[in-house]
């Protein structure tokens, strides 16, 4: 692996722009969904809208939940494949950071404790940190932590410097393109990520079993500290079930930003990282799907922990970026995915279905307007109840993976209350998506990125228990 060094990069790429065609499409989606929702206020046609939306959602959700129980690569398959591998894959752990000196000390320590090594104790990984114009001494903090933890020889800091560079994680990652990575696998982590010592060993098993793209299971630190943190924790579990089910059904399963893992050659083949990607995870998911027919494996037992978003205002800004990023991905890469000869019909239909669910919030807005004008609220309530009900159903099912610190599964009462909590939390998307469409259609000038604040101090050991053995599939 590479020697320790510090290099400077001028960065690359451009700030995301909004083509006029995307603006028109965003307005069309907003207007079309609104019009469908307004039909729910019609005296004769009103009952059809909630029945159709609920029926389609249920028809998609049930197969996904069932499929999540039979992944193409189980945790046992991954473990066996790594044990039998003649040569284990190596990792380049890449972190983009701006003013993250405090939390990066913890992450460097976690990386140093990885047990993924040769029999002689040589690490099968390297660490690359992109210091994206930090002013808090991030680069110095990484170098000091690497020295303290004995991994200076396998740690590099890339200084991303320059004027008028595009902001965002995708832009920062352009300073660590695959050609500077020495590992077989590129693993991307957020600066506040926390890892347990066996993370790389477990992740490597999926690649040994034949996967070319894998996403880690995202976990939330301090999930018991309050309603908001707990809801985010269960949201990640629910999202994991959805993508695990989509993967199992042959669909276009996707990366999630913290814990992206992709073979270096595959990343290079699709053009590496793009500064123009508002959400680098789903952008890359679509590019590898369209270009190489690759789907993303979901690793239940390779867990990456992260801090929750601690304020409602920060959460709102984060979800606006996610929602707008989803639309930008659909407009930019959707046609290529749908037409890709590398993908099966099932994968292409899955992509279309997943994108189309973004139309539900505008329908709800239209139904709300119709309810105000006509006074008939039954259809609106039915649509919202169906949306939240299916979220609760999937939440209940996904929570089968959760256990108490002593290893006990959740009892029925707690499982139900948490399923209802995550369902209500998902109701936020009914507000976020229409606003994101408005921003996409009408905003002028560059997108403003809002950096999440991280305070550090949390430890994965304080989370759920029973993680020293491989989780059940």
Image (spheres, grey):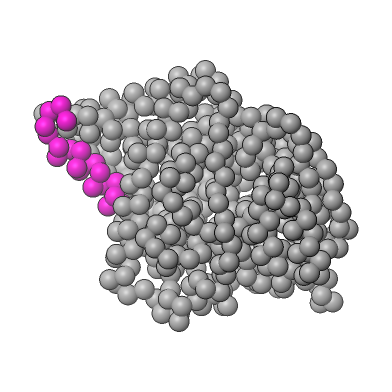
In screen coordinates, is 440 left or right of 85? left
Depth check: give the residue in front, 307 or 29: 307
Q: Main secondary structure of the magenta part?
A: helix
The residue at 45%/47% (across/down) is: 315
Depth check: give the residue in front, 30 or 306: 306
Q: Is residue 451 visible?
A: yes
Q: Is residue 385 magenta?
A: yes
Magenta-highlighted residues? 372-390
Where is residue 433, by image quadrant? top left
Depth check: give the residue in front, 351 or 120: 120
Q: Is residue 147 magenta?
A: no
The residue at 19%/35% (across/down) is: 48
Percent across and percent down for residue 33 are 32, 29
The residue at 48%/53% (across/down) is: 309
Quarter holding the N terminus?
bottom right
In the displayed orientation, state which residue is furthest to the front.
136
In screen coordinates, is 215 left or right of 50? right
In screen coordinates, is 125 left or right of 53? right
């Amino acid at each position: 692996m590479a020697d320790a060094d510090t290099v400077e990069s001028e960065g690359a790429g451009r700030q995301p722009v909004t083509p006029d065609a995307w603006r028109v499409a965003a307005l069309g989606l907003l207007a079309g969904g609104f019009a469908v929702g307004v039909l729910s206020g019609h005296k004769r046609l009103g009952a059809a809208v909630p029945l159709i939306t609920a029926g389609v959602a249920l028809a998609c959700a049930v197969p996904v939940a069932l499929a999540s129980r039979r992944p193409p690569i189980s945790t046992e398959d991954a473990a066996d494949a790594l044990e039998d591998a003649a040569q284990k894959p190596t990792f380049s752990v890449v972190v983009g950071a701006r003013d993250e000196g405090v939390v990066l000390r913890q992450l460097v320590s976690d990386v140093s404790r990885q047990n993924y090594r040769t029999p002689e104790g040589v690490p099968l990984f390297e660490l690359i940190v992109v210091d994206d114009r930090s002013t808090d001494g991030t680069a110095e903090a990484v170098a000091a932590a690497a020295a303290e933890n004995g991994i200076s020889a396998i740690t590099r800091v890339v200084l991303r410097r320059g004027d008028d560079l595009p902001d965002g994680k995708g832009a920062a990652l352009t300073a660590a393109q695959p050609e500077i990575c020495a590992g077989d696998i590129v693993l991307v982590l957020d600066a506040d990520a926390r890892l347990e010592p066996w993370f790389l060993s477990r992740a490597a098993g999926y690649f040994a079993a034949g996967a070319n793209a894998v996403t880690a299971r995202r976990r939330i630190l301090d999930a018991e500290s309050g309603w908001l943190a707990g809801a985010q924790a269960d949201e990640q579990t629910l999202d994991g079930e959805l993508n695990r089910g989509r993967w199992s059904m042959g669909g276009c399963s996707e990366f999630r930003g913290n814990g992206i893992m992709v073979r270096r050659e595959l990343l290079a083949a699709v053009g590496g990282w793009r500064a123009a990607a508002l959400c680098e995870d789903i952008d890359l998911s679509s590019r590898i799907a369209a270009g190489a027919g690759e789907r993303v494996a979901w690793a239940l037992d390779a867990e990456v922990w992260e801090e929750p978003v601690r304020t409602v205002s920060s959460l709102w800004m984060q979800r606006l970026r996610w929602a707008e990023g989803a639309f930008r991905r659909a407009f930019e890469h959707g046609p290529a995915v749908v037409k890709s000869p590398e993908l099966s019909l099932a994968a292409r239909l899955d992509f279309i279905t997943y994108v189309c669910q973004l139309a539900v919030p505008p329908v709800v807005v239209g139904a709300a307007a119709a309810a105000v004008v006509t006074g008939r609220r039954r259809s609106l309530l039915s649509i919202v109840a169906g949306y939240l009900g299916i979220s609760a159903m999937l939440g209940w099912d996904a929570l089968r993976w959760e256990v108490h610190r002593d290893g006990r599964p959740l009892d029925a009462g707690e499982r139900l209350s948490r399923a209802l909590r995550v369902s209500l939390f998902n109701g936020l998307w009914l507000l976020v998506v229409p606003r994101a469409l408005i921003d996409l259609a009408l905003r002028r000038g560059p997108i403003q990125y809002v950096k999440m604040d991280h305070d550090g101090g949390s430890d994965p050991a304080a989370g759920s228990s029973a993680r020293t053995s491989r989780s059940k599939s």
